[in-house]
Amino acid sequence: MKLLIVEDDATTGSYIARGLREEGHAVDLVDNGREGLIAATSTAYDVVVLDRMLPEVDGFTILKTLRGAGFTTPVLLLTALSEVEDRIEGLQAGADDYLAKPFAFGELSARVAALARRPQALEAETVLRAGDLEMNLITRKVTRSGVEIDLLPREFALLEHFLRRKGRVQTRTMLLESVWDIGFDPGTNVVETHVSRLRAKVDKPFERALIETVRGSGYRIVA
Amino acid sequence: MTGRLRQIWRSMPLRLAILLVALFATVSLLSLAASYAVTQSSFEQTIRADLRQDLAGFRAAPTARAVALLVEAESRAADPNRFILSYIAPDGRIYGNGAIARDDKGFHIFSLNPDRAEFDGEYLSLTEALYGGVITVARSRVEIVALRDVFVNILFISLLPTVVIALSGGLVLARRSKRHVEVVSTALDEMTSGDLAARVEIGPRWSDDLVRIGGKLNQMAAAQEGQIRALRGVTSDIAHDLKTPLQRVALYVQDLQDRVKDNAQAVELTARLEGEVGNMTRVFQALLQLAQVEAGSPKARFEEVDLAQVCRHVVEVFEESAEASGHSLALDLDVESAVLQGDRALLGQMVSNLIENALRHTPAGTAVTVRLGLHGQTAQLQVVDTGSGIPVAERQKVLQRLYRLDRSRKTPGHGLGLSLVEAVATLHGARLVLEDNNPGLRVIVTFVT
């Protein structure tokens, strides 16, 4: 993927760039808003990672200018103020996702991947598959190797979330946001508990584990 | 409606008007009464003088016979309703147009016609012995009686319109001043609920003192707005200045973790480092969020929120961790839904902080209950535990930011959870009370729905 990072802090910027390059992406890094705007409008990027506070032209202005000019490139907004107010402002200005500093690299990488492969329109799939695991969205039946697996509603939602994002890492906060609809950290292990219960039902009785832990980042379902 | 009436009744202009009207009415009544009394007595004196003159005229007659004839003649011309005269001659015969009789009810005057009808009305009379007989003259007080009606009329014609006009004037003024005061009070409400841009819109017809008060209020609001904006600027600058180094530390630690994978001790140290960075970040974010909620600005994002739904949701999220720590977490909803205007995320965080607080500071085996009930116009959220509670002296202090009970120093947490609960409650106009649950702590948040 081709990524643009607009980040004025050189240390943070270069770490992110290095990490993303190690994951195999082509990364352009600029450290001010002016260059960021020029780069974003002159090159086709898959995702733009944009810092909210930048010298010369701030992240918000860049975002609004891009959207005003009709650029639909997915934008992940990084910000120092992590709070709801900024989050809403950012989303209203046209950001596709939002990440508060300080963040772990795994979180950033997972969210960038999620943005790049965001489906343009939701496909009307009725059966989701991963290996020998099948989830029928109409009958709400889950089977693996033909064996029916009984899931509680929240476990079903969690598995559906993983299956719709096959192979992509889902972090704890991403899961809290999408599966539990909670935008703050409740300080519980609700995600871990559900993942381990899901594993007990979906993976444990079978030979190959489908749900994988990505250290320091989150979980994903193996394609 | 009655509330509005009471408000008008208690307004200053109406009260002034009523006071003035009462004063005016009292003075008018007193002066009318005085002039009535004076006029009445002068009328009576005139009548008495007339009566004395009448008698003097009869006294001029030389004999009883002459008096009797004179009385006969005059009584024929006199209207008995106004003037009555009678002479009881020495031989017992009565001349004139009326006679005075007396019974236990007082004096009566009768006609001397064969019908002997009693004359109605009030008379003043004078009686005198004359030539062995008795002469009586009486004049009607009808003018004086009429005078009373005249005065009553004067009273109604002059006083009543004055009272009505003054009162309705007062009412109009009261309503106008109520409108003006309402403009001021609405602006104040907006200011206190966090709308920094709220100002009193001073009308062109306002009285000087209101204009002055409004102007001062606007000055105050502008100064406050400036200060808060400056404060927010500082907060966001600090956030930026501190978060960048924090971000770098977080990335360095991650890098370090990748490089020291083979050294068990280093792995443990870096894991602790990561944990500490995480704690710092959480305290920092909690402080920033608290500052934002206390500034009141998120009110613009209020929407209809079902508090019952929020409780169900948050309790579900905590079920496993409560179970894991040996607590029993129960949800006790009296109502299917309790809809109020609020910020869904903040309300969720409030319930979450309360549950987290209860789970963290009570030993295993403690029951924690989230309760929601409607009481009239209010929705009451309670988070109740059966732990060791908070001593009375400490209950207000635990709401202060970063305050922690001595015995809680060793449990994790940053002492901001309850401060945020209080800030969210205040933002929603709700009342937060900490009570003894005998044993344990009962946190009650009362919302107006």
Image: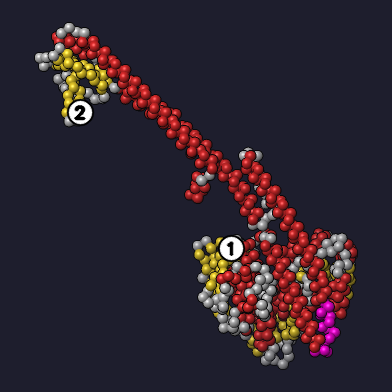
State the residue at coordinates (14%, 9%): B65
State the residue at coordinates (68%, 70%): B402
Look at the numbered disc 2 and give the secondary structure of its residue.
strand
Residue B116, percent from left and from top: 16, 22
> Can residue A191 be seen?
yes
Q: Amino acid at mark 1?
A: Ala
Q: Quadrant of residue B155?
A: top left
State the residue at coordinates (74%, 82%): A219
Q: Nearer the viewer, mark 2 or mark 1?
A: 2
> Residue B314, relative to residue B215: is it above or below?
below
**Mark 1, other Cα within 10 Å: few <14 / some 14–19 / many ≥20:** many
B256 in the magenta segment: yes
Sequence order check, earlier mark of 2 and 1 = 2
Q: Is residue B434 left or right of residue A116?
A: left
Q: Which residue is mark 1?
A: B430
Q: For this rendering, which residue is in front, A9 or A51?
A: A9
Q: Are marks 2 and 1 on the same chain?
A: yes
Q: Which residue is mark 2?
A: B106
Q: Quadrant of residue B132?
A: top left
> Residue B161, relative to residue B438: is it above or below?
above
Q: Quadrant of residue B79?
A: top left
Look at the numbered disc 1 and give the secondary structure of its residue.
loop
> Can residue A217 be seen?
no
* Label 1: chain letter: B
Q: Which quadrant holds the C terminus of chain B?
A: bottom right
| Mark identifier at residue B253 | none
State the residue at coordinates (59%, 63%): B430
Residue B73, percent from left and from top: 20, 10
Q: How many marks?
A: 2
Q: For this rendering, which residue is in front, B201 or A89?
A: B201
B408 in the magenta segment: no
Magenta-highlighted residues: B251-264
